[in-house]
Image (tube, rainbow, N blue to C red):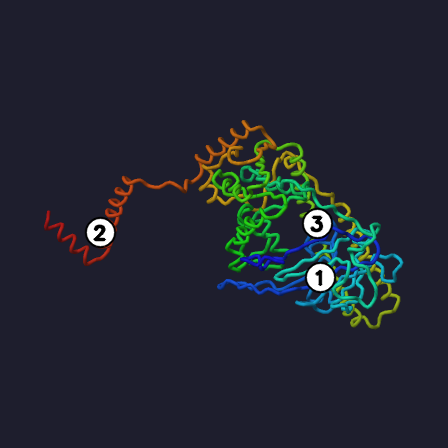
Amino acid sequence: MTLTDGGLQYLLASARLNTGVKSGRYLFELKIIESLNPAEAQGGKARAPAPRQLVRIGLSTKDSSVFLSDGPDNVCFDSEGFFIHEKKKSKASQKFGRGHVVGLLINCDASSPNANTVSLFRDGSRVSEPQPIPDNLRGKVLFPTITYRNVTVQINSGPAPLASLPFTCRMLNSASKADVELIPSPKAQKNQVIFPIGLPDTGVFDWADGFLAKNPSFTELSDRKILDWAAKSGLWRQKGYTWRASNDKPEMGFGIPNMDDTSVSRLLMDIAPTLQRNFVIMELKDNLVASQRAKSLKHFGSFDKVATVVMGEPNSEFKALVQELLLAEKKKKAEADRKKKAVEAERKRLAAERQKKAEAAKRARLNSQKKDAEKDEDEAKAEDEQAEDDAVDEKMDEDVPPPELTDDEKKLTCRKLEASDLLAAELAKHFADFSLPSSDEGFSSVRFEWQKEGECKKILQEYVHEKKMTQRVETLKPGDWFQEEYKKWQKAYQDLKRRQMEWKDPTKKKQLLAKKKEEA
């Protein structure tokens, strides 16, 4: 069942079975037990994503996103009657909702006339024609997956169906070993929580992404991941998902009170310790401040708590990752430019084609008495000119070299992201409290990824000293002497201002001059 407190009511939840089908024909069921309607905070500028209650049932590969309709490696039916693969959505079934038993028939039996298809059944009756499994998923092990929001569902893998079909079909729980692949349950062990610690704008977020790519068993807890989750859940964001004020604390900007008040982040920190998972706490500023680290550590009492310091000269592995990311950015930009040029070229071609047709029609009217041979010659000449233009365009496309990194880019050890890691105001307020972690704080271990502890201490001290010399200090408070002198100045300033206004008034100026003359 989904959690619905705060902003969690707007976010999708997902679950994937640990048994995948690679051949045969099997049934998997779910029943929607209840539909939830959590209360919403008033005063929002945007509407909640529709529909409020949503269920998707389908198949996904083992290493794909657990959210159905996110990426090419899954396929599904949803409760609104759509069949979805990647960005393509088509009306293929009837709707289903609370109280319905929904069955997903997975047919990977090569001898069946409906091989490599999935079908949907509601309360034992077929509500969709067999839909073909996309080509990129055929031959792969496919795991039954559900994605849902504001509902409680019962999952049934067998051995007996909740709603019998018009024909005999084995449930997934009774599958032949040769037809399925089972992911074994993880061995009971102490879960880990990792706190990456590094200076702003030195590649800490790229390091975290690289770590998560190599360690898929870890889940990141951070505001930037909440934004990713919201995007997968279909929430509209006022400034789009590419915009963020900083990487550490991006503004939510949904116009929905329960999403914009960071309640989701607080709830996740309360929920996470109850789950048997490994976590990465990617909070850059909080991880650098000892008092904030202490608050985070309290949430994960029984976990193996590891502080990972990433400061100084990166190792060769991270440098290679940076080069890969920079090259990927250049390729993406080059591909976008190529598509833009192609669209512009196609627009010009169509415009030229329309112009030629208009000119041909005009010539036809003016030269209606010309011989057929002369007309054929003109048309042949026009075709030759068009062929030459196409050949030139193709040659231009072929001559474009693939993007490569420059010598200066190859020397970079971290890349500049679109947004800064930390807002200037946040940095100015907290940089003096930055410190390295120690085992005395409650960490099971402290790892230094790039440089040794002594070098990291020196780097941090130099960074804080440099900021003290250049940053505005937000925490300074004036003393009593300054407050007294400031009051005197304010009084003198108001007196000068009053006298200036009087001098500007012709009547009062005349009086002041007369008084001054009399005093003299």
Residue at numbered disc 1: 30
Q: Work out whether residue 165 or residue 50 is closer to the camera in this orientation and state it.
A: 165
Give x and y (percent) for residue 513. Answer: 16, 52
Horizontal side, residue 506 vs residue 83: left or right: left
CB under 8 Å between callouts 3 and 1? no
CB under 8 Å between callouts 2 and 1? no
Give x and y (percent) for residue 138. Answer: 81, 54
Q: Secondary structure at mark 3?
A: helix
Question: Mark number for residue 335?
Answer: 3
Q: Work out whether residue 503 or residue 156 is closer to the camera in this orientation and state it.
A: 156
Q: Work out whether residue 212 or residue 387 is closer to the camera in this orientation and state it.
A: 212
User: Foreground mark, 2 or 1?
Assistant: 1
Q: Taking the image as drawn, is residue 190 in sight? A: yes
Give x and y (percent) for residue 520. Answer: 10, 47
Residue type, mark 2 in image: Arg
Q: Taking the image as drawn, is residue 136 in sight? A: no
Closer to the chain start, of discs 2 and 1, is 1
Closer to the chain start, of discs 3 and 1, is 1
Give x and y (percent) for residue 278. Answer: 63, 43
Residue type, mark 1 in image: Leu
Question: Mark number for residue 330?
Answer: none
Horizontal side, residue 165 vs residue 273: left or right: right
Horizontal side, residue 252 vs residue 182: left or right: left
Image quarter in which the N terminus is found: bottom right
Q: Secondary structure at mark 2?
A: helix
Residue at numbered disc 2: 499
Figure quadrant of residue 212 = top right
Closer to the chain start, of discs 2 and 3, is 3
Residue type, mark 3 in image: Glu
